[in-house]
Structure formats: structure tokens, C-alpha cells
Image (tube, rainbow, N blue to C red):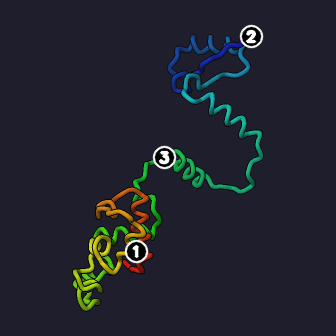
Amino acid sequence: MQARWWLIRPMQDRLNLPQRLRRKVWEVADAPEAPRFLRYNLGIPGNERADELAKEGAVEDQPENSVSFSEQKTIIKALMRPRTNRDDYHTTSREQQVNLIRLRTGHNRLNPHMNRKFKLAPSPTCACGQEDQTAEHILQRCPSLDEERKEVWPSPTPLQTKLYGSRQELEKTTTFITSAGLIV
């Protein structure tokens, strides 16, 4: 005898069926050859795999810690949320991000900002005496930082790459700031 598979509609659909048709469905369901279980979710993509996983999970040991319904919802929503690709800046550490954003915006502890904004530095000029101590100056031209710069970037690298490049380049920039002993 071949098993029968029945698709039983949700309750609101069943209520709309004519009385005679509903009786016929239940007569067939009560017949000796009636299926042992009724499938409510045929044709739903991924359902068979979900059923398999549910059955596997049911036989495994269940954790003893109780998680509230609200926590369960939060966890499920977080797991279901699509993962967004993160740009190179956002894959760096928080400390690296702070240093990079300070260098990018000029809102930092270098002399020009500290002199003009807060009057905490005697002048905006770099300790080398050649020009203002800007991010561009320390990353590209400051003669007192030549050795550290050549260790990190053996060949000339544009400022744009140092501040907005790949993760490797961004890490090089923060390494340079640290090795130079600068606080930005």
C-alpha cells in the first residue's frame, strides 16, 4: 500500500470550504488507508532540511540554562540578519580607527589643532621647524620621522593610500604613528 500525502490548508482556508467537501476530507482521513500523519508545509523551500535539523536537535542533549523568550527572539533575529560586508576601515581595531579618523579629519593632538583650537601648543609648527605639524607633514615629509617612515613604507606611498587604502595600508599607518611615538 502506497502512503498518501495530504496537504491540509490552514484553518481560515478550511472554514471557507463548502460543508460537504469538508465532510468528504474527514471521511477520507478516517478511512483505514488514511495517512498516519498530515503534512502542513509541503512545497516550502528548505522545509525538508529544517525538519531534518529539528529531528537531529531533538535527540541531542539540551542545555540546562534557561533563556527567556525575549532573549531567544533577539538571538534568532541577530542570526537571521544579513551580514553586511565591512570596509577595510571598519575591520581595524577601535584604537586604529580612532587614530585614522583623527588623522583624516584634522581633529587631533597635532600642533595646528592644539594651537588654533585650544591654545595648548605654542605654535602650529612641527618640531622639525619646516612646516605645520599636519597629518600630511608627519606621514609624508617630516625629516625627523624619515627612518620610521622608510621602515614602514620602503617605497613612496601617496597620502590617500595611507589614510584610505586597504586594511594593510591602514595598519601600516597606525604602526607608523605608534613607532614614531606620536599621540594623535
Query: Which numbered disc, 3 or 2, marks the residue that appears first in the sequence?
Result: 2
Q: CA distance from mark 3 to mark 2?
A: 45 Å
Q: Which residue is mark 2?
A: 33
Q: Amino acid at mark 3?
A: Arg
Q: Which residue is mark 1?
A: 148
Q: Residue at x 39, y 80 (%)?
A: 183
Indicate whether 98 appears above or below 25. Answer: below
| Foreground disc of the pair 1, 3 | 1
Q: Which residue is mark 3?
A: 81
Indicate whether 106 appears above or below 83. Answer: below
Q: Secondary structure at mark 2?
A: loop
Rendered image quadrant of residue 8: top right
Q: Amino acid at mark 1?
A: Glu
Q: In the image, is 91 to the left or to the right of 45?
A: left
Q: Secondary structure at mark 1?
A: helix
Q: Residues within 10 Å of mark 1 (few under 14, many from 20)?
A: some
Indicate whether 53 appears above or below 149. Answer: above
Residue 109: x and y in percent read: 33, 81
Query: Which numbered disc, 2 or 1, marks the residue that appears first in the sequence?
Result: 2
- Whether tag 3 and tag 2 are in contact, CB under 8 A, the answer is no
* Viewer-proximal residue among 107 and 173: 173
Q: Residue at x 56, y 47 (%)?
A: 76
